[in-house]
Amino acid sequence: MTTSIDRIVSRVSRWPGVETAPHRFGGTEFLVAGREIGHVHDAGVVDLALTKRVRDVLLTDGLADPHHVLPDSAWVTYRVRSAADVPGAMRLLRLAYLWRLLALRRRGVDLDPAIDPDTDLRRLGLPADLDALVRETFRDTLDRRAPV
């Protein structure tokens, strides 16, 4: 693995609820509550599992490419060619992670009540259309504040 991919794996694997496993086509996959949110390949390819609506916005905004093998799926690809690409990969992986956390919270499963998705979303600095999509999709969950 490249140094950049190693750095990504190291960071993402420390997020609450994230498990890593070897990916069937090489590299490392990231799982949250038994579901894959994405994976990295040794050659610097980051593939993310999202929804088609999120995928479409990411493609329109130029934040990711269609998946390198399944271009019509809900998956997207982000290429890490140098250390300068790591923040972009981390941003998209964090988006996929937050999407999964919010979906779980909607079902009453909270992997870490200390995580404030609203704050995380602001930190990601997503384009307005993508931020609006996430907030609209999870309005009910984001409006609920975890008891302190």
Image: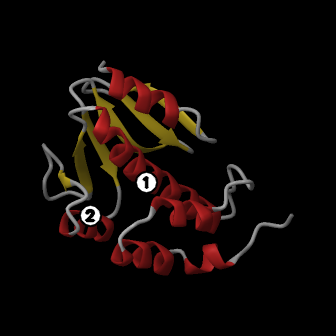
- Type of colouring: secondary structure
Q: Quadrant of residue 60?
A: bottom left
Q: Which mark is residue 58?
A: 2
Image vertical order of residue 98 relative to residue 81, above or below:
below
Q: Residue furthest top?
A: 1
State left or right for residue 127 relative to residue 76. Answer: right
Q: Position of residue 54 (x, y in %)?
A: 32, 67
Q: Which residue occupies 60% across, 68% down? A: 118
- Dots 1 and 2: beta carbons under 8 Å? no
From the viewer's side, name the closer residue of 55 and 34. Answer: 55
Image vertical order of residue 42 relative to residue 109, above or below:
above
Q: Residue furthest right?
A: 148
Q: Amino acid at mark 2?
A: Leu
Q: Position of residue 42 (x, y in %)?
A: 26, 23
From the viewer's side, name the closer residue of 115 and 86. Answer: 86
Q: Which residue occupies 36% across, 72% down? A: 130
**Split into 4 quadrants, where in the image is the N terminus?**
top left
Disc 2 element:
helix
Q: Position of residue 49 (x, y in %)?
A: 34, 51
Q: Amino acid at mark 1?
A: Ala
Q: Which residue occupies 39% across, 23% down? A: 6
Q: Earlier in the sequence, mark 1 or mark 2?
A: 2
Q: Which residue occupies 62% across, 73% down? A: 141
Q: Position of residue 144 (x, y in %)?
A: 71, 76
Q: Which mark is residue 96?
A: 1
From the viewer's side, name the closer residue of 106 and 123. Answer: 123
**Split into 4 quadrants, where in the image is the C terminus?**
bottom right
Disc 1 element:
helix
- Nearer the observer, disc 1 or disc 2? 2
Q: Which mark is residue 74?
A: none
